Image (cartoon, rainbow, N blue to C red):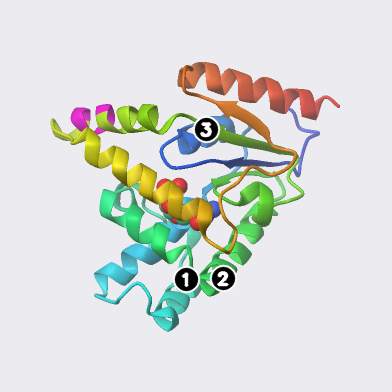
Amino acid sequence: VKQNIHPFIIAIDGPAATGKGTLARAIAKHYDIPHLDTGLTYRAVAHAMLEQGKPLNDLQQAMKIANDINFSKLDRSVLSAHHIAEAASKISTLPQVRRILVQKQRDFATHVKGAVLDGRDIGTVVCPEASVKIYITAASTIRAKRRFDEEVKRCGIADYQAILEDINRRDERDMTRVDSPLKPAKNAYLLDTSNKSIEIVFLEAVALIDSVIDD
Ligand code: DC
């Protein structure tokens, strides 16, 4: 681990199920810096709204929940559920909720050791000054197949067509919303993982980050 690089922010963006989270966690471990999966912050708001039986467009309640969220208590095993992803995508179209979560995400990014954040708008909105920006993509059919394999492994059964439709619908919403739509930052490094293993993607990302550190 290089000690002279901090504070050093790595932004990882891309559509659903590209392996952003897996890559971000591996990078955080490799460089020994904190990691925030910002998707979990939107998922946490969506989850609380669903638990409380609130309609997702109840802005006052969504803002209250966003304000109260403790970023150190985000439980990925609970929040990764399928139905929460769709609700999170809807919640994330609300600019007032985004504003609250983005402020907290920026606070996280100012950690003295640096940080790696992954999401949809890290390189464009949350940390436009990030040292390294990576935009990950993969064909949606390939992302759906990976999710399908994961679910089969976990529950023994999955519906490929339903997963593919979910991914396409969510990407469409995330890319076309008015506030902070998903898109690569101008200076982002584009990484297409369609034909690459997670190991290769990790090595490419580390090579890129090291080249920036060495500058
Ligand atoms: O990365 P994820 O699948 O956990 O994200 C869930 C939803 O949250 C995603 O469909 C859109 C929203 N999101 C966002 O709008 N901005 C981010 N930085 C991260 C996620």
Q: Position of residue 35 (x, y in %)?
A: 56, 44
Image quadrant containing the C terminus = top right
Residue type at mark 2 is: Ile
Residue type at mark 3 is: Thr
The residue wearing badge 2 is 100
Mark 3 is surrounded, within 10 Å at the Cα level, by few (under 14), some (14 to 19) or many (20 or more) other residues, namely: many
The residue wearing badge 1 is 66
- Per the image, label 1 sits on a secondary structure element best described as helix
Question: Mark 2 to mark 3: distance in Å?
Answer: 27 Å
Q: Residue furthest left?
A: 156
Please state if 213 lies on the left or on the right of 169 as rendered: right
Q: Position of residue 139 (x, y in %)?
A: 44, 29
- Per the image, label 2 sits on a secondary structure element best described as helix
Residue interval drawn in magenta: 149-153
The one of 2 and 184 positioned closer to us in this rendering = 184
| Membership of 191 in magenta stretch | no
Mark 2 is surrounded, within 10 Å at the Cα level, by few (under 14), some (14 to 19) or many (20 or more) other residues, namely: some
Residue type at mark 1 is: Ala
State the residue at coordinates (47%, 38%): 21
Please state if 149 lies on the left or on the right of 200 as rendered: left
Q: Nearer the viewer, mark 2 or mark 3?
A: 3
Looking at the picture, does residue 196 appear above or below residue 47?
A: above
Looking at the picture, does residue 191 appear above or below residue 72?
A: above
Asked if ligand 1 lies within 8 A of label 2, the reply is: no
Q: Is the Cβ of the residue at disc 1 closer than 8 Å to that at disc 2? A: yes
The residue wearing badge 3 is 137
Q: Is the Cβ of the residue at disc 2 closer than 8 Å to that at disc 3? A: no
Please state if 62 lies on the left or on the right of 137 as rendered: left
The one of 17 and 63 positioned closer to us in this rendering = 17
Q: Main secondary structure of the magenta part?
A: helix
